Amino acid sequence: MAIECLVLGAGQEVGKSCVVVSIGGKRIMFDCGMHMGYLDHRRYPDFSRISETGDFNSALTCIIITHFHLDHVGALPYFTEVCGYQGPIFMTYPTKALAPLMLEDYRKVMVERRGEEEQFSYDHIVDCMKKVTTLDLKQTVQVDKDLQIRAYYAGHVLGAVMIYAKVGDTAMVYTGDYNMTPDRHLGAAQIDRLQLDLLITESTYATTIRDSKYAREREFLKAVHKCISGGGKVLIPTFALGRAQELCILLDDYWERMNLKIPIYFSAGLTIQANMYYKMFIGWTSQKIKDTYAIRNTFDFKHVCPFDRSLINASGPCVLFATPGMISGGFSLEVFKQWAPSEKNLVTLPGYCVAGTIGHKLMSGKPTRIDLDKDTQIDVRCQIHQLSFSPHTDAKGIMDLVEFLSPKHVILVHGEKPKMATLKGRIQSELGIQCYDPANNETVLISTTQNVKINATKMFMRSCSHVDLHSVTKSAPCLSDFSFGDSGASNLVRNEKVAEGILVMEKNKTAKILCEDEFLQTLHVKEHNVQFQYSRPLEVCREQVSCQSSSGLLPSNGSSPERW
Amino acid sequence: MERLLLERLEVHLDPLSDERRRLRALASARALIANPDSSDSTRRSTVDALIRSLDAHYGDPAFLRPALKLLGDAAVLHRPLAPSVIAAVRPFLNGGKSLAADAIAVVASIAESSPEGGGEGGVSLLASVLDEDLVLSLASSPVSLVRSRILNLLVSSIGRAQSSVSLLRPHLMLQVLLGLAVDLYPLVRRVALDGIMAFCEVAGSDLDGSIIDCCYDRAVELFRDEDELVRSAAVRVVSKCGQMFAASKERMGNMERMDVIFVQLCSMARDMSVKVRIEAFLALGKVQLVSENVLLQSLSKKVLGVRSGSKTITKWSVNESKFSLSAAGAFVHGIEDEFYEVRTIACQSLGMLATFSIQFADNALNLLMDMLNDDAEAVRLQTLQTLFHMATHDHLRVQEKHMDMFLGLLADISALIRRAARKVLQLMMLPDIETFKSAINCLITNLETYPEEEEDIFSVLCYIGKNHGNFFAKLAKEFAQEIVPSCGELSLDSPRVAAIVVLFISSSISNEHLTCNIPVAIFSYAVSLVGRISCSLGNALNRDALMAYLCHHSEIPFSDTTLKSKVANEMCHSWSLHSVISEVKVKENLLSMNEIATHLKHSQKGVEQTDEELMQSIQSILEKVVETWPLIKLHCAHEVRRTLRTCKEELEMIAWNVSGSPSALLEFALQYVQIIQLIAEIWEKLQLKKSHIVGTMTLEFLLEKLSMSLRRMRYGFPGLSREVECHIIELTLLGFVFRLCEVGTCSNFVLKKLQAITSSAEFLCVEGSSKLSEFAKELLRSCAEGGTGETSQPFPIYKLLELFNLQQVAFTGRFKCIKAELQVFGNDSENPLPFVPGLPVGITFQITVHNISTNDRLWLRMAVGVSVQYVFLDSCQFTGRDEVRKFAVNTPFYATPKVPSFLLRACMLMECPSENVTYQKKDQRGPKDDIFLVCEEIEVYLVKIDSR
Ligand SMILES: [Zn+2]
């Protein structure tokens, strides 16, 4: 059996994750994302490659979405409502809850702000979500007779999973985005030791090795603490989901420990709703939050209160979380305009900002003045702190996962081309595993080993399941003290197991292995003993010995016994 | 009634009756056996009937299984039935069919309940039923339950059996264990691994290298097992093997191998299972002899260049780059782990490894400092604990960049954290004057925010002042200006001023040359702080001495001028030289850490070390103590002191999370370390004496302390093994030789006593199997000579001392510890008891005694200055017969002095049960000469009734 892997998106790039894998006649689409960097047709995966006729329902067995990020779920409403896919869709509970928030937010920005023609409507989103079947962690779902899928915890964002899929003897894992180190609100990715033919893994940080998260946290806390003790205001522009919660937990905890009384504000809107979901999906968060939520739900932040617009110009220090993350507009821009001119204040920036946003301008060198448009200019005198938190695993984590799973083949997606090449080299040389980094719309063909299944009798299984200690014992020298020489010692570990049985091809063409003792019974024959006698002609003059000897032979009756 | 039931039983047990009836018959048989009113004969006939029915039902497991179980229960309930039950069950063991599993269970339960408590007796009983062949055939039975049961039986017999009886000869046992370690069933694999572990433990250092190899290889194979519990067990075995390799004779040849073990354990530290990770980090902390570059690799996720000397690596068939890769950053991952249990242990192990390499300690410190910001209190505490551990090993080199985070902890909301942070700060050497200043400022802020922690903060200030005299000298002027205002009075109510005064005093005491720079006024201010300061210094400085010192410098008239200067001098001396101070503090620290530990105990339950492991670590510490002997002989006093101090700290560290049984061994070990410390001191003193005379006063004091401690060792731990007792007696003899050495001659009394002890040593050695050491033999000979001839030649003391050799002894922990606690409720310096001078005062002591038998003679000693009063504590007063008993004693103290207030020191003593040669002090009502302390001395505060 072979695996055919068609990469529709995130091949040698980051964005619009979408991989279609065919195993044993089944075709699964992993993720259905959109590319945020394009506004033309390149924004969506080229679905026509799946089926030229556009009959996606017969071309695909199912779609599985790993998490709610738009580059993993963004194209889904388009695909189902516009392209007409009606088959099964799987995602986890949190993803199902949060993905519509993300999609709707994006749609609004696209349509209302940029005045673009809408690709899908609000109703599309709602209808699309109705078709979704939910998955739980480690729950094995039998999609159809042959295809079996299971979700494993991936960290990254709330509800993110890695997907294990199995058809017959062929098995694979698609990781989606994952994080091997836990953060303040999510645990580390967790998976069983599986026998895999293929692993498709993200490779955002294919060459980066990150140091301990404590250092990042310390830098952040130090900057914030310094600013507020100097009476300044801290503006933390974030995405609504994920990073905001993590930073908030971090600050809330620090406030608690250091007994600080300065207010932390959360700007209204999406974030409040998201917090509600986080409180609901406690089971998907980190161990610490799970352990303590009975006493206090971590997301009921003690020191956090909702922000009121009138507080923007209130005196005294404070910390404010505001969306969107890259200060591309909205509330964070409004506050930024007010606070940036004071050198007492602090603005933090997320690790990645799209070119053209204010965040990006602040990141690339420290400007003293930003031209918002022809008429508006902002004096920037405040301090800037760049956050380096990231929900993706680093190169070490990827290597660790690959080594832990030790699959037969690895495909890298979701990364930058040159870095992926480096990682590919490492996986091949250090771990000795065949690795590929296909570009978009390329297909990788992987041949898998063929296993022949045979049945075994209970007795045979038993005979395999234990070691005959007698056989070892008798050959070992009997010494009573603790040292028994080299030969004795090597005897101890040498008891490799040998199971003996007889392979029988039954009438229905399935092979079966059984014990010698059961053999005759299976064939419904009696045991015949053929005995030989020495026949020795007595000749006086010449001594001639003709003797034959043989062990008991079995009568042949059509089936073909073989020694195994 | 019984008869009737019996008869019906016989009928119903018939194989021809229907199944329901037969099972009901079994139920009534159970009732007959279990009923306490049944007569013995009824029980016997019931059992006989059952046994007969076994044969009749051959091949009917539905009946046989419950019947066998019932027979087993009967034999456990009524011991006399056991032989016939065993005989009846015996045939079922053959053939290894599934009924054998039930038969094994019966035999095991009988053995377990044998009168000897499942000890040696149980094993011999088992051995009589199961011969080697049978055990082997059962162990290779195709039925997994049989294998698992026989394996359980074997594993539990390991360690119990003395050399005389065992189920299998060692090599066969090992074969079975190794064979079953790759069984199809995870449960069997796991138990087999536990068995290998127990096997290694029992065999100890006798085990041949090649055998350890086998165990090690098998365990490493199982590192990739599917079952997490098997993997954890495998990690434990590998860790144990590592320890054994490190302890073996060819340890140096094993260096490369230790690296490999370390790396393998590192790779397990990335396991997906929490349990395995916990085991792996525990194991990493115990690895020794790892080369520095491998250690360093575990702190960095980046691969650090190619290791030198890579040729030998190939021997272990480990790919070079993979080698570094799997070690890379194990600890970075460990401290970032999702589970606080893993983080805690990773942190602890970091501390253990930090003692091996300065470079490692430095790099680890960067990680540790970051962990101070962890969200789990347990982890922050452990981090502080680890820092403390590193500081006591002089491996804590903080840099300026660390201080921010660290000093931040002083403002932590948790009092435990603040306190622990201060303990670390106290031992820290600050890198530069800026950090010194910010540390002082943080402490002052700390004092302002939490005035109730004044005592602790003052004490830290004292230490910082003392340790950083040079920094302080530079800042002294600045500080002085700050607190002495231009116009007179300064307010000691301000915490800031008080703190700075404390700093002045402490640094001037330790750095005499600073004294002249300090404004006299400060000393006089300090006088009013004397109570608060001396309190925080605890035992290090006593209040009067401090007072005298301050008066001396502030030029306030003090009653006795000679005393004044003498005291002051002595104090400076003791302060700067005496390591005892810091030891006392260290001990205190650990005690307070102990408090912390109890807070966290419930949360740490899962990861608590087992008793076995504890014993092991205590054992290894004791070995380390004994290893100092050659150094003592070579007069490497400094080195010895250091090692012993470390040992003591480690023991106290262990005391952390221990309660219950190992505490006797712990107590013993602490006492033992103290004795070796004393011996080392005395040895040093005697050496000095050879060259020039020093005050014999202190030597006398040390000798007295030594013999007191030795008596405590000998009589305070009932149940010591003979070997250990011999060991202690030898030490006692050494004490006497010291004494002879000091006096120069041999008084008749000492000689007699010597003879008595030597003969008891001889007696013990004859009784036991151990041999008398050369030292004891020589001493015996000398005594014999000295005893006969009056004008014998002088004792060959130096020869004897040369001969003495401290030997490794197995301090097995099956003994108890006699000890007591003394308390006077509600009494402290703030709440003294009232008294009328010259009249007796009644004091109520709350006493808790542990493991005291009715024959023991206990005394309460109360002392004020030179006047001492003994009170005999009648053992009938101790209510109850438990190990721990509590009672109150109200006793008068007669000789109240004519002073406004005084301090009474009280402690409890026990008479040694039978020292043959004693001499009673005639005119004294008190215990015999040979006594030892069973509790810490406490202080009782008393104040004249009208001066309150
Ligand atoms: Zn993502």
Image (tube, coloured by chain):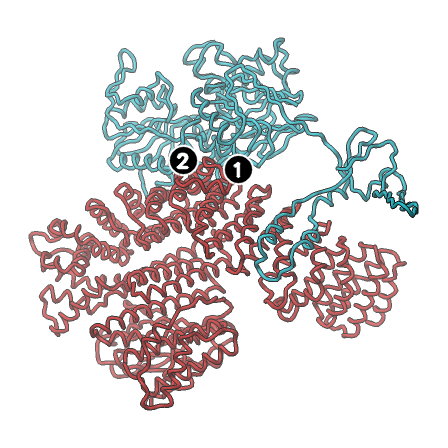
Chain A appears in which tint?
cyan
The picture places residue B319, in percent across and down from the top left corner, at: 48, 37
In this rendering, does residue B209 appear at all?
yes
Of residues B594 and B387, the one nearer the viewer is B387
Above or below B907: residue A457: above
- Name of the residue lying farthest toward the left: B487
Number of marks present in the image shown: 2
In this rendering, does residue B664 appear at all?
no
Q: Which residue is disc 2 drawn over? A: B303
Of residues B723 and B311, the one nearer the viewer is B311
- Identify which residue is drawn at 89% across, 39% down: A525
- Identify which residue is drawn at 37% across, 88% down: B787
The picture places residue B603, in percent across and down from the top left corner, at: 47, 51
The picture places residue B605, in percent across and down from the top left corner, at: 50, 53
Among the chains pictured, the one given red colouring is: B
* Chain containing mark 2: B
* Chain containing mark 1: A
- Name of the residue lying farthest toward the front: A541
- Give the numbered dot on residue B450: none
Q: In the drawing, does residue A376 fall left or right of residue A171?
A: left
Q: Which residue is disc 1 drawn over? A: A283
- Identify which residue is drawn at 73% across, 69% down: B82
